[in-house]
Image (cartoon, helix red, strand yellow):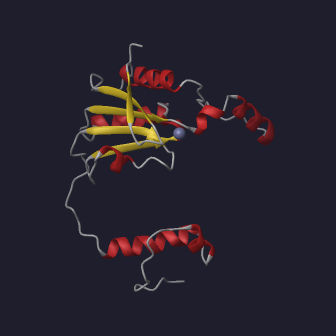
Amino acid sequence: MPIPASQPSSPSLDSAAVRSGGTVTDRLVEANQRYAADFTDPGMDARPVLKVAVVACMDARIDLHAALGLELGDCHTIRNAGGVVTDDIIRSLTISQRALGTRSVVLIHHTGCGLLNLTEDFRHELAAEVGQRPTWAVEAFKDLDEDVRQSMQRVRTSPFLLHTDDVRGFVFDVTTGLLREIDPQD
Ligand SMILES: [Zn+2]
């Protein structure tokens, strides 16, 4: 069913609004219509202005652009569960650097991450349940700082990347909004 163009705007996609009718995706599509109504083409190309790629956890509490003072077009944001540097993150970073001109890499893990409560048992239990072993590792971790160091190391030693001299890692505190930098040597 088409959505009327003159839908009154709602300040947030709160759960009450979702309950009042339609799926959450319907709400997002409505919000997009309001967004597009005020949108003007910024005329940018695809290369990030600040030449930086930010790799972070997908956690819903981290607003990367607000937390880092970033504007539209400034950076690549590459997110997954944990902000872990997997082969697919390396794929994205390789394209980011070689095709789209980024030079710096910022890695962000965070306090209260869901991966702190998981182990590789998650993967074994999943395999037992569905009868198929996933090809990926869960990449669960117990020590945030150590996992940030591991992630920095994976980026720095990747043979595919052009720029590995400016790679820095942080833990974002979801209760204060502050980043704490991790020393790669500790
Ligand atoms: Zn997380």
Please say if 180 is above or below 35: above
Q: Is residue 102 left or right of residue 160?
A: left
In the picture, measured across the screen, residue 114 lies left or right of residue 177, that is: right
Viewer-nearest residue: 143 or 2? 143
Residue at the limit of the structure toward the front, as seen here = 176
State left or right for residue 169 relative to residue 133.
Answer: left
Residue 179 occupies quadrant: top left
Count of labels in the image: 0
Q: Quadrant of the C terminus?
A: top left
Whole-percent x and y of residue 185?
38, 13
Give x and y (percent) for residue 161.
33, 27
In the displayed structure, would residue 42 be above or below residue 145? below
Instruction: Please state the horizontal and vertical placement of residue 91, each as a whole percent of the image.
Output: 42, 35
Residue depicted at x 47% and y 21%: 150
Above-or-below relation of 75 to 133 = below
Front residue of 25/61: it is 61
Image quarter in which the N terminus is found: bottom right
In the image, 177 versus 4, the foreground residue is: 177
Residue 161 seen by the camera: no
- Is residue 33 shown left or right of residue 116? left
Query: Can residue 166 be spotted in the picture?
Result: yes
Q: Quadrant of residue 97?
A: top left
Q: Give me the residue at 36% from left, 35% from top.
A: 93
**Coordinates of residue 85 in the picture (x, y in percent):** 47, 30
Name the residue: 52% across, 71% down. Answer: 27
- Which of these two is toward me, 124 or 17? 17
